[in-house]
Amino acid sequence: MISFLNFGIKDFIDIFLVATLLFYVYRLMRESRSINVFTGIIVFIILWLLVSQVLEMKLLGSILDKLVSYGVIALIILFQDEIRKFLNNLGAHQRFNKLLRFFTSNHQKKEVDKQAIMPIVMACMNMARGKVGALIVMERYSPLHDIINSGEKIDAAINQRLIENIFFKNSPLHDGAMVISKKRIVSAGCILPVSHDTDIPKALGLRHRAALGISQESDALAIVVSEETGGISAAINGEFKLRLSAEELESIITKEMAME
């Protein structure tokens, strides 16, 4: 009864933070297909607390204490890519981005953004009419160094004709992804991580899976022009926006991108 009366706001915050941490760890494990590992960790923690705190078994408790100490290091080594992805996504969270935009945005920047966006929109519309497949990745706050280094460095100003020439069917770079960063076409022919989600419509091909994959592993905006249908799609935060018109594509890029 006394313990219940001493339960304060700090204890509530403590429980809430632990529950939130467990939820994000669970989601991280589920996305990396390691949910069984997460279940095993939870069972081990419950067993450790039961032995060391409730039953107070000193010998077995000390052994489990050592396993917990070294187990954390082992988990960091085993899941370093997933942990890096989680921290990347946390740092690039939409709310933090909005706060940063609030302090850095100005009228002049919006005018410059329009000049950089329209060549991308016009190139996508022309390629869609000719059913030329294309995959354009626009870097936001999460750096894409590994993706950029997987392709051919270009470092050119955003230009409609250049985009169309890169994705021309006989071009050696048309099969890979183009990466745009800070109002520059920095690389082309890049290799992207492919999403293995089972709920992706079968009508969507490898370009769409690659676009979804990069949007799941970073905060990048990926634009796809379908070679089969000529449809334009965008992937952001692990979700697709399909069958976009020129106005819708321009609106999405303007809203989602902070082109500096």
Image (cartoon, helix red, strand yellow):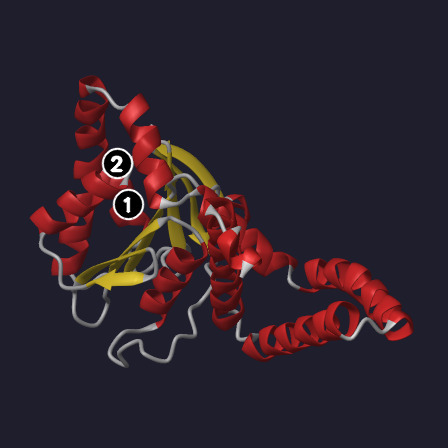
For residue 210, the mark is none
Can residue 161 be seen here? The reply is yes
> What residue is pinned by disc 2?
159
Give percent across and percent down for residue 184. 36, 33
Q: Is mark 2 on a helix, strand or loop?
A: loop
Q: Which residue is drawn at 57% across and 60% down?
A: 82
Q: What element carries label 1?
A: helix
Give percent across and percent down for residue 180. 36, 41
Residue 38 as seen in the image, left or right of residue 216: right
Identity, as a three-letter code, of the amino acid under mark 1: Ile
Choose top left, top right, bottom left or bottom right for residue 135.
Answer: bottom left
Q: Which residue is drawn at 14% across and 44% down?
A: 251
Q: Is residue 33 above or below residue 18?
A: below
Q: How far apart are marks 2 and 1 (CA)?
A: 6 Å
> What residue is pinned by disc 1?
163
Residue 243 as seen in the image, left or right of residue 71: left
In terms of depth relative to the viewer, which is nearer, 28 or 183? 28
Can residue 151 be seen here? The reply is no
Q: Residue at x 39, y 54 (%)?
A: 177
Q: Is residue 226 above or below residue 160?
A: below
In terms of depth relative to the viewer, which is nearer, 20 or 123? 20
Choose top left, top right, bottom left or bottom right for residue 104.
Answer: top left
In terms of depth relative to the viewer, which is nearer, 11 or 170? 11
Q: Which residue is drawn at 31% across and 22% down?
A: 103
Can you say which quadrant of the picture contains the C terminus? top left
